[in-house]
Image (cartoon, rainbow, N blue to C red):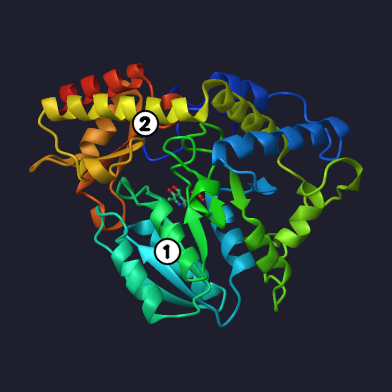
């Protein structure tokens, strides 16, 4: 059998992620690999923390990229902050809240569920009621940007409610970071995790996280050892924590992927994170206006709609999989299918990071119109 190099087609990625990776980021990935304790690499790690402070709008010292996809960020937050016997309020309004529940239960804790319909934001009134009915809960966990529906919840209010009741807040910002305001310090959030492959437009496989000093104290004061060796932040901080010579080996860092993230964060810094949020909002407005002009309706009300993830209702009688297949084959354009309860009911059109451009909006509208008529 002859096996040749894999040369992927040149697609335009307008699904729920991964998003288009900018050529600057791809070329950073191809730079020579050096050691993960090389002084020059360590200096780059320090810069990376500063760049992540800008992206997360925080001064939290524990702000680092974890080795692994967004799911590693999620699990790291839960296994470090939650212990057997704890109770955690978990908000679910889509697929990813369900994963938080799984994480809580696998930590030996109890998940107290606050559920909202898919397509609606988390209802802060229900969260407040749950906090009042369950004094002493350890944390409130919610998804800021629900990728399965395209809904944004009020993170500032949910974090404040948690804080007022003495609970930690654990926030999924996998789809929000870089695309819509993530204001870690202003919200008073305790743990936020994200992913490299959405609005940061980096290659998949890294999970930036930030944890408050309060969260750090909780981790240091645990009664039980963190059950995961790989995700134990006490150990990871030996590598990422201090600068320079005191760093020690924990696991071999994904060195070239970190070059790529460094480059994508430089690009975010150059644009300015506020300008990136505005660009995502502008592109989504243009897309929604065009979709409406060709007779398509959005799932989510404008007040809670994410600019970077636009869920479009599939018109009656349309073979949705065939539409996506034709977009891919005829236009090299990927859009997303519905997930979970919304499978077959919506398409998910991503406008993320380097892909949130007028060119992509125009391509998507033109291609959809052509395929649908
Ligand atoms: N949380 C949300 C909201 C997501 O959209 C995703 C991925 O799409 C994840 C968590 C999991 O991230 P990953 O697939 O990088 O593990």
> Would you say residue 250 is visible in this rendering?
no
Whether disc 2's CB lies below 8 Å from ligand 1 is answered: no
Marks 1 and 2, Cα distance to the nearest angstrom?
A: 31 Å
Between 93 and 339, which is closer to the camera in this rendering? 93
State the quadrant of the N terminus. Answer: top right
Towards the viewer: 232 or 52: 52
**Who is closer to the viewer here, 198 or 318?**
198
Locate residue 206 relative to residue 371 in the image: left or right: right
Q: Based on the displayed image, in which of its 4 quarters is residue 361 positioned?
A: top left
**Mark 1 sits on what residue?**
161
Write the residue at 47% across / 71% down: 165
Q: Quadrant of the C terminus?
A: top left
Dot 2 falls on a residue whose secondary structure is loop
Q: Compared to 166, does 59 lie above or below? A: above
Q: Are marks 1 and 2 in contact (CB under 8 Å)?
A: no
> Which callout, 1 or 2, points to the residue nearer the camera?
1
> Which mark, residue 335?
none
Q: Residue at x 71, y 62 (%)?
A: 232
Which residue is at the front of the view, 351 or 343? 351
Q: Residues within 10 Å of mark 1 (few under 14, many from 20)?
A: many
Secondary structure under badge 1?
helix
* Furthest residue toward bottom: 85
Q: Which residue is mark 2?
A: 351
Horizontal side of 127 relative to 76 (left or right) equals: left
- Work out whether mark 1 precedes mark 2 in sequence or the reverse, and give the earlier one: 1
Which residue lies at the image location 45% right of the left edge and 22% below the top edge?
10
Q: Position of residue 90 (x, y in %)?
A: 42, 68
State whether residue 154 is above or below residue 277: below
Q: Position of residue 207 (x, y in %)?
A: 59, 46
Q: Residue furthest front?
A: 164
Can residue 280 be spotted in the picture? yes
């Amino acid at each position: 059998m002859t096996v040749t190099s894999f040369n992927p087609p040149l697609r335009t990625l307008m699904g729920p992620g991964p998003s288009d990776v900018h050529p600057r980021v791809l070329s950073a990935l191809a730079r020579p690999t050096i050691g993960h304790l090389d002084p020059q690499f360590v200096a780059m790690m320090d810069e990376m923390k500063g760049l992540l402070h800008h992206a997360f709008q925080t001064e939290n010292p524990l702000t680092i990229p974890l080795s692994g996809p967004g799911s590693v960020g999620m699990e790291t937050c839960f296994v470090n902050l939650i212990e057997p016997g704890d109770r955690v309020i978990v908000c679910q309004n889509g697929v990813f809240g369900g994963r938080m529940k799984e994480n809580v239960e696998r930590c030996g804790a109890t998940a107290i569920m606050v559920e909202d319909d898919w397509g609606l934001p988390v209802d802060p009134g229900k969260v407040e009621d749950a906090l009042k009915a369950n004094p002493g809960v350890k944390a409130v966990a919610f998804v800021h940007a629900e990728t399965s529906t395209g809904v944004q919840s009020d993170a500032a209010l949910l974090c404040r409610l948690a804080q007022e009741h003495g609970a930690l807040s654990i926030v999924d910002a996998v789809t929000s970071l870089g695309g819509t305001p993530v204001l870690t310090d202003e919200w008073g959030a305790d743990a936020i995790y994200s992913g490299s492959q959405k609005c940061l437009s980096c290659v998949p496989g890294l999970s930036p996280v930030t944890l408050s000093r309060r969260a750090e104290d909780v981790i240091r004061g645990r009664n039980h050892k963190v059950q995961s060796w790989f995700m134990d932040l006490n150990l990871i901080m030996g590598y990422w924590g201090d600068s320079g010579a005191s760093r020690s080996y924990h696991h071999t860092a994904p060195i070239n992927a970190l070059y790529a993230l460094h480059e994508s964060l430089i690009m975010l810094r150059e644009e300015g994170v506020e300008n990136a949020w505005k660009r995502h909002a502008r592109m989504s407005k243009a897309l929604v206006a065009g979709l409406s002009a060709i007779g398509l309706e959005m799932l989510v009300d404008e007040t809670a709609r994410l600019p970077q993830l636009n869920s479009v209702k599939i018109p009656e009688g349309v073979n949705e999989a065939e539409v996506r297949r034709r977009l891919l084959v005829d236009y090299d354009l990927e859009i997303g299918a519905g997930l979970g309860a919304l499978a077959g009911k919506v398409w998910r059109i991503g406008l993320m990071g380097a892909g949130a451009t007028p060119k992509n909006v125009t391509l998507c509208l033109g291609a959809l119109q052509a395929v649908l008529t």
